[in-house]
Amino acid sequence: MTSDIKEVVARRAGLLLPHLVALSRDLHRHPETAWEETRAAAWVADRLSSYGYEVTPAYLGFPTALHARIGSGPLRVGLCVEYDALPGLGHACGHNLIAAMSTGAAGALAQVADDLGLTVEVYGTPAEEGGGGKIELLDRGAFAGLDLAMMVHPAPVDVAEARPFAVSHSEIVFRGKASHAAAYPEDGVNAADAFTISQVAIGLLRQQLPGTARVHGIVTQAGEAPNAIPETASGRWYVRAASLDELADIEPRVRRCFEAGALATGCELEIAPESQPYAEFRTDGSALAAYVANAERLGRRFDTSGRASRMNRASTDMGNVSQVVPAIHPYIGIDSLPAVNHQAAFAEHTLGPAAERAVHDGAVALAWTAIDRARQARQEGRR
């Protein structure tokens, strides 16, 4: 019976594929950054409504979040949709494909959910690229009671297990005093110099950090004119670590580097979190094994080593979801090499035959994994 249902679901996904590709292309053409995904959320909601889902827009008070539901079975499976783009890079992380794959899995399962004993829920989750949308949704009660949460993320190659870094995101602002750089330099307090000193300190600190740590950022503003000492300088900085516990140990050391910049220059320092920290990932082993088997049945092959497989270390707020409910977050290859995530060339690779195959395979593999979990639940119920 399970095999027959899987064939039905795969055929359904095939029929939906042109619409899913169109959704992905629309998102690609109209990238929207964190918390601004108005069109994206509406397009996903419309597609889910056409599949018979009961859709709640502006879910839990967030204008670009959504929740959709179909079926009345005792096993609750959640599919996460991401649709935010990167500032200046568009969909260079492939969230247009994530939206299409999760929406496709939802559509493929819609007509068989009750037969399988499933309630299928779709979560439109804004602001994954630094805003922590899933964490904000968690704080308002989203995902509670799910038996499994799933999504698939594009990458250069297929990788099964997510092993992301925990990460904090901060805005850094130094405030000094402007002055004429030639005539009255002694009257100035140089905020740009504070960043220079801080970055040198961070560079030296790296030697003493664990191998699992990453500290990186950008200066977003550091003056307007070369003949005026910069009064204000601002930037965005990320600190990554193997776990939230390790992150809590490292963050104060990085903070002291910025404090050193302020102390040396006489600037005032402000550090403000841009979101709550992202957690490391806790993978549900049985669900991941089912996904891998299903993806391999579709002809996909998993990479376990090499540079191309390292996308599984990228931080995600799905890690926080995985701390609360069973979850998987595998990666699906789109044959993008030498382009990798967060490069403009990767955004180009989210269109075309390899990307369209990933939309199909990701949707089917997710749907089949939900079917496997439903079968497992029924067998456990008989015992």
Image (tube, rainbow, N blue to C red):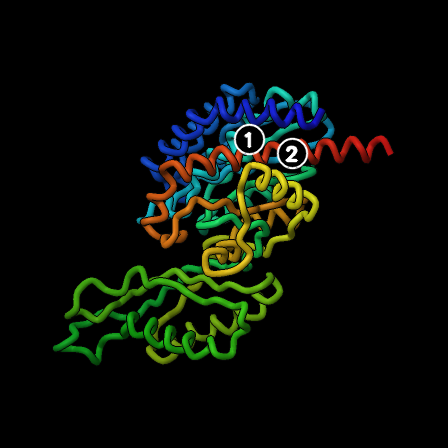
Q: CA distance from mark 2 to mark 1?
A: 9 Å
Q: Tell me residue 296's x, y (percent).
A: 58, 41
- Callouts 2 and 1 close, C-beta under 8 Å: yes
Q: Secondary structure at mark 2?
A: helix
**Image position of 170 with respect to 327: above or below:** below
Q: Is residue 308 above or below residue 19?
A: below
Count residues near mark 1 (Cα–Cα under 10 Å), then give few for <14, some for 14-19, many for 20+: many
Mark number, residue 105: 1
Relative image position of residue 361 (x, y in whole percent):
52, 36
Q: Position of residue 162 (x, y in %)?
A: 57, 52
Q: Tag 1: residue type?
A: Ala
Residue at 39%, 52% (x, y): give it: 337
**Residue 288 in the figure: left or right of residue 357:** right
Task: Tell me if residue 226 can be seen.
Answer: yes
- Image location (x, y in percent) of residue 172: 39, 63
Residue wearing tag 2 = 370
369 with respect to 228 (left or right): right
User: Does 225 appear above or below 86?
Assistant: below
Give the quadrant of residue 193.
Answer: bottom left
Residue 290 marker: none
Neighbourhood count class around disc 2 (C-alpha, 10 Å): few under 14, some 14–19, many 20 upward: many
User: Nearest the camera: 315 or 296?
Assistant: 296
Viewer-side residue, 334 vs 55: 334
- Amino acid identity at mark 2: Ala
